[in-house]
Amino acid sequence: MKSFNKRLQEIQQQRNSLVCVGLDVDPAKFPASIRNLENAVIEFNKRIIEATQDLVCAYKPNLAFYEALGERGMFALRETLKIIPGSIITIGDAKRGDIGSTAERYAVSLFDDFGFDAVTVNPYMGSDSVEPFLKNPGKGIFLLALTSNPGSKDFQRLKIGAMPLYEKIVRKAKQWNTADNIGLVVGATHPKELKRVRAIVPDMPILLPGIGKQGGDLKSAIRYGCSEDGYGAVINASRSILYASSGDDFAEAARAETLRMRDEINGLRAVNCE
Amino acid sequence: MKSFNKRLQEIQQQRNSLVCVGLDVDPAKFPASIRNLENAVIEFNKRIIEATQDLVCAYKPNLAFYEALGERGMFALRETLKIIPGSIITIGDAKRGDIGSTAERYAVSLFDDFGFDAVTVNPYMGSDSVEPFLKNPGKGIFLLALTSNPGSKDFQRLKIGAMPLYEKIVRKAKQWNTADNIGLVVGATHPKELKRVRAIVPDMPILLPGIGKQGGDLKSAIRYGCSEDGYGAVINASRSILYASSGDDFAEAARAETLRMRDEINGLRAVNCE
């Protein structure tokens, strides 16, 4: 079976795109014509996916946004996953983490029941909280290392001797990656640290949130986030794409923004490779 | 409005119990007469709750076990929460943690939609990932400090100077606890560290998993986990109560085990207070 990391790399190459669209749905931001539909979330996602699917390597629904909508939200998430073509990676942004026997249940839910290709995992509880997500080499995880938010300074940057905690996690992840199905999450808001992480794990995928509304810099995300082959960085944008327009042209606006972002990224990759 | 921590303390006093039953449902372990019912999980929980409700201060469903059962599981969780009397604390063991705008959605889901009184939260992403759960003083969180599982050694015990990471988190939690609605999770498998945590936060509630199947010691959990007033420790048991019998007498067996545990705890508390 092909490992998750290998499959991600092939999809990025075939599609010539590092763009991941974060499907963080917020009905309050939908145009009125969509918001008032019975299945507003499904319809919104369908339009976004139809408009952007040839431009991306991955979609990343954040589970919180669906859970907050109750049963209807979870139904919409299931339906959304059916709409995404099998040739595109789906990342369940769930940031789960629990003792082994419980983590196993989360893996069943996210991989077997929902059918995500990969999930984000919180490392705080250690090895037995991560292992159940690694059993199937075809399914992957992105382990939180240095997240994009201001609170990342509270614990992730604390120094263990000379080494910040997030680097300890990066090194553990490297050690655990025997089935080639672990990637990392590093916020695009931390370019210097991203460079350091990439030096430690030259070939692991890195999911980079924080571009767009959070202020992360795309240029350094590409410069330091990509592997030597020019792939391996998964550049996520959510709000800046989904809500590029608040009008009925939201899908066209989302396409234009995704296209702009993909091409800007590919331009920056070309410069890197010179 | 009464703070969550105050309410928990009053409920523990009124009910004279520190026992929390972890509703970690596993249909494969249900007796055949229940397992084959259409609403097996709801029926199982209903029987457990009816048999134990006068003996506990809290119920703690772990969301992973319901999520793994798909839509049926989430429905069963909603129905289970309706069955639990309002005079008993409900803890959503979800271990969520995400950037502020996302954590807000998890808070909506767990507090407003499901209606939990408290939730477990993973601290790794720092202050803005925790704050959205603290806005309503009547709702509480238990922040993961030192968890009961073997993997807790991987990161939680790493030393920041002379201080282990989990103690840094305990001290931050103390600082964040301005609305009196933060508690901690410390595994009963770590008695020495529990003693140290209790010395730092004399009055904060501590949720203690790890008794029973995981091998935690009840005597030291009570000795070191309780506040000076003899309350404040929430002693969780899941599998040892739910599956005390695999036969049709499972509810009676669960009651007997809960009663035994409550009385053993109260006996140990009495010794503490001498």
Image (spheres, coloured by chain):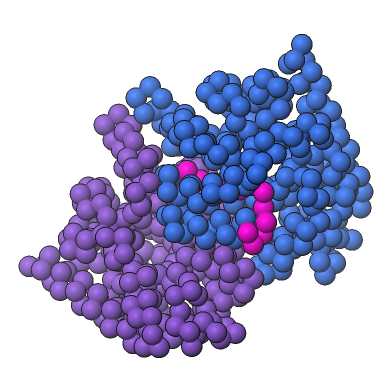
Chain colours: A blue, B purple
- In the image, residue A144 lies in the stretch drawn in magenta: no
Seen at 64% across and 62% down, the residue is A113
- In the image, residue A120 lies in the stretch drawn in magenta: yes
Quarter-of-image position of residue A199: top right
Rendered location of residue B201, percent (x, y):
27, 51
Rendered location of residue B68, percent (x, y):
57, 65
Seen at 74% across and 34% down, the residue is A10
Rendered location of residue A55, percent (x, y):
84, 38
For the N terminus of chain B, give its image quadrant: bottom left
Depth check: give the residue in front, A175 or B156. Answer: A175
Q: In this view, does A184 lie to the left or right of A165?
A: right
Depth check: give the residue in front, A273 or B46. Answer: A273
Q: What stretch is highlighted in magenta?
A: A112-123
Depth check: give the residue in front, A266 or B136. Answer: A266
Seen at 21% across and 71% down, the residue is B265
Q: Is residue A49 left or right of residue B196?
A: right
Q: Examine the rendered structure and indicate whether residue A62 appears above or below residue A145.
A: below
Q: Can see residue A178?
A: yes
